[in-house]
Amino acid sequence: VPMAVSATLVFISLSCSILLVTASNFRIDNETMSPGTPDALGMKVLRNLDTGEEATIIWESGGRTESLRLGSKTRPGQLRDVLAGHDGNASYVRENPHWAGCLLMPFANRIRNGTYQFQGTTYYLPRNEDEPGVRTDALHGFLCNQTLTVVSERVSTNSAILTLGFNFSGSESETPGWPFRLNVLIDYVLDETGFAITTSAFNPMIEEGQALPWFNSWHPYFLVTDVSQAVVQLDKCVRDPSQDAWNHVLMGPGAPRYGDLIPTGKTAPWRTFNGSAIGGDSEKPTYYDHEFKSTQSPEDCATLTHRIHDPVMKDTFVLWGDSQYRVVQVFTGARELWGWQAVAMEPMSALADAYNNHDGLTVLSAGQTFSGTFGVRIE
């Protein structure tokens, strides 16, 4: 079982916000999203004043990335909307029908029947994916739609950095079935190379000596002109050229559309994303809701880099993750199911149902910190 990466003590003060301002080409602005609800949502917009690039973070909705605009490499001077969002509708954000832009923690994807065992105790999570006869699972953790604390804002000639924080109390009312305290800091960075998110999760239960289970992910939908024409490429890094770089994590009967969508413990080599288009047609692209696991060690392939190419606009979105993120989920059904021309590609630190199968699960010991970074750029 992978352990936490360091024993650095991290405490989050929820009472202060630090703003460091210098002469810069970057800025962080306060904005609100209010149409559709009386409950306006606070946002922070990280801006590159030279290029017009920007990242919008809703700190009052789990720190989700509501939008990301980056410069096109094939059309100099033009910006590209990278991610699908909620069209400025705060009610739509609160309804959260598709988890767009959400950070998923302290678990991501599904936990079978919302049930798991940890250190000899059985816990029961809310079954918020409830489709009787199909699946009744816990889905995507507890952070999305929480109100986070703005810890600091830093701008310079090179970057804009926003740090948000959230302390999980472990209370039954806040995180039923997950009775652990956890302090999380999230750094959002916009710079000349693109956009990145670093998550640091600290286990403060030192006096109790209590460990906790942890894995995380991000749920972006990458906008393309036509999903059926888009090209998905997973990282190609292999130590031995005769090896396959990726295994498809096999699910139960009915997958990828139906069934429990829980890993079976079996995998198969994956060679389909080899430069060809997703396929199908514009209204009904080929349907993938597939999970993949790298066959390579972090020592041989420390950073995994995936690409979604839009052949119409000629841009390629690059999603990269550091050594913590060895799993990726690809979903192409957004166009068919709710009309988005978008491909979801999610960097994950463990497999779905890792609380039960323990594949990639981090057991975060008291006083230890998990830290992982993923990011996006255009090429």
Image: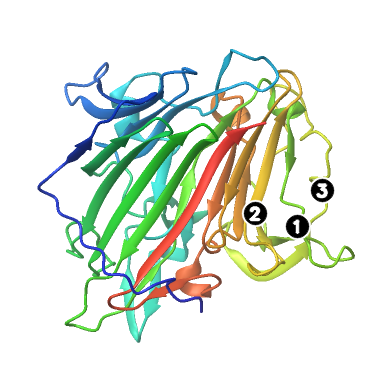
As drawn, 14 above or below 248: above
Q: Single out the residue that lies furthest toward the right.
A: 242
Element under label 2?
A: strand
- Of the two numbered discs 3 and 2 in the rendering, the one whose residue sits closer to the viewer: 2
Element under label 3?
A: loop
Query: What's under tag 2, amino acid-wise?
Result: Leu
Q: Position of residue 205 (x, y in %)?
A: 21, 75
The residue where tag 3 is placed is: 272
As drawn, 306 above or below 170: above
In this view of the protein, which residue sits in the foreground, 143 or 319? 319
Which of the two labelled residues, at mark 3 and mark 2, occupies the earlier sequence position? 3
- Of the two numbered discs 1 and 3 in the rendering, the one whose residue sits closer to the viewer: 1
Compared across the picture, whether 33 is left or right of 302 comes to: left
Query: What's under tag 1, amino acid-wise?
Result: Cys
How many numbered dots are placed on residues in this image?
A: 3
In this view of the protein, which residue sits in the foreground, 47 or 276? 47
Q: CA distance from mark 1 to mark 2?
A: 8 Å
Tag 1 and tag 2, C-beta contact below 8 Å:
yes
Query: What's under tag 3, amino acid-wise?
Result: Thr
* Residue 156 in sight here: yes
The residue where tag 1 is placed is: 237
